Amino acid sequence: MAAPEKSPLLLIPDRQVGFIGYGAYVPRYRLPGSAVSHIWRFGESGSPVKEKAVAGLDEDVITMSIEAARNALARAGIPARELRAVWVGSESHPYAVKPSGTVVAEALGASSSISAGDWQFACKAGTEAIVAAMGLVGSGMGRYALAIGMDTAQGKPGDALEYTAGSGGAAYIVGPADEALAVIEAAYSFVSDTPDFWRRQEQKYPEHGQRFTGDPAYFKHIQAAAETLLRETRTTPADYRYAVFHQPNPKFPQRAGKALGFNDEQIKDGLLVPVIGNTYAGAALIGLTAVLDIAQPGDRVLVTSFGSGAGSDAFALRVTDAILERRGKARSTADYITRRTEIDYGTYVRFRGKLAMR
Amino acid sequence: MEIPRHWRINPQRYELIGEECPHCKIKIFPPRDVCPNCGGEAKEEYTFSGRGEVYSFTTLYDGPAGFEEMTPYTVALVKLEEGPVVTAQLTDLGSTGVEIGMPVEMVTRRIRSDGDERGMLIYGYKFRPVGFTTAK
């Protein structure tokens, strides 16, 4: 395939950029879907996932971002002081007002001469931060930028989302393409005002807009973003070894992938929702870490996020030789998934702060 | 409110930054600017690896103010590989039993909230079992 021409739609910076490091984080606790069904449906209802990852009592988006970012720095092989941005995308920032980014930056040992802040766009807050990092690095304003998608996802007790709303995510360091383990060949963002899912200020749990969830939200935006990226880069699904989509449940990404022309083989390695749940802003990004853990130089990867409200960011990546020596420098995503302690619904209620103590 | 007291020690709490004595080269934690070994001035920053082992431990069922909602939890004396012994909570134990000599690594976690749910969140080091690594 020839290098993509400068399409007016594609996001391609003047200086080509890529991921020079990546890192995943999944907390160790797992709540089986059957435990939710047992409490709310007499165990008669099936669960869309086997289990979901649950953050411990002392974990939140800040602590989980710190660990994922330390893994990303270890793979990138750069000191934290060389970062010029620390951006955290999430819909569960611990503070309503006070940035997660500054705490993460200080814990990593980043300098004070950075841009640090928090991004919010439901489940695509993390990829939104990556697009911004592409701009910062691609314009030459900074050499390295850290972008994170991480969530301790909320789901109302008894709601369909409670089966899947999980905890976890991933961190990426964007840098010059010649240092990258995966070059970003092009990106594309597609958004519209769609009322499929929201959480109002000071509300604990999100609401979803019934029929808006599927076709008018997830499928419309994922397909528009991925189709446009494929068309404008003059690539077809057959050019990609792997495809990763936002994964609120196992069915949606499989159906979206199929509609776009991808097969199960291309999708399965990045599909983590059955074993960790839907990690919201972390979901597509941690799926990509599992792919990078096994990808070979030259492999192409298509990644498409989805955030309610609504929009999708799609990325066309090409894995480089650097993947081989860098991926072993931090724990793999499989290491985190294998580290597992099953908990019951009562423990989950306590860990996630659903018990009123006063 | 103890905001300045926490803020002042962010680097040591978030990253395990201590000091190295320029005279006798021992590593110092927490930082105290005077070497406890040779008595010389010691102000050179040193970032600890975070690796160590459990020197001793105990489990608290009745936590002090600010830690009530975390109980029961295990506190250990952790001997860092560079020498100093630090007191910290162990975390992510799951069903793992704690033993003296058990290798542990530092993680940055939420320690507590300063006061009620309106208060500042305090983050800092805890240690967890190393067990699941395959990183080279």
Image (tube, coloured by chain):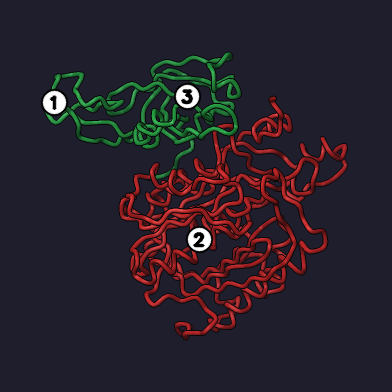
Chain colours: A red, B green
User: Looking at numbered disc 1 in the image, what kind of residue is underneath it?
Assistant: Cys
Q: Residue at x 73, y 29 (%)?
A: A346
Q: Residue A55: which quarter of the image?
A: top right
Mark 3 / mark 1, whichever is N-terminal: 1
Assign a secondary structure to mark 3: strand
Q: Residue at x 31, y 51 (%)?
A: A81
Q: Which mark is residue B89?
A: 3
Tell me the distance, in whole angstroms, between the alpha carbons under discs 3 and 2: 33 Å
Question: Counting other residues with Cα less than 10 Å from the Cα at mark 2, is it few (<14), some (14-19), or many (20 or more)?
Answer: many
Q: Disc 2 vs disc 1: Cβ atoms closer than 8 Å?
A: no
User: Looking at numbered disc 3 in the image, what kind of residue is underneath it?
Assistant: Gln
Q: Which mark is residue A8?
A: none
Q: Is residue B111 left or right of residue A84?
A: right
Q: Which mark is residue A129?
A: 2
- Chain assignment, label 3: B
Tell me the distance, in whole angstroms, between the alpha carbons under discs 2 and 1: 46 Å
Pick the residue in front: A315 or A272.
Answer: A315
Q: Is B73 above or below relative to A158? A: above
Q: Which mark is residue B24?
A: 1
Instruction: Give the x, y percent position of residue A39.
Output: 82, 35
Question: Looking at the rendering, in which quadrant would you find the C terminus of chain A?
Answer: top right
Q: Is residue A297 visible?
A: no
User: Looking at numbered disc 2 in the image, what kind of residue is underneath it?
Assistant: Ala
- Foreground mark, 2 or 1? 2
Pick the residue in front: A345 or A48.
Answer: A345
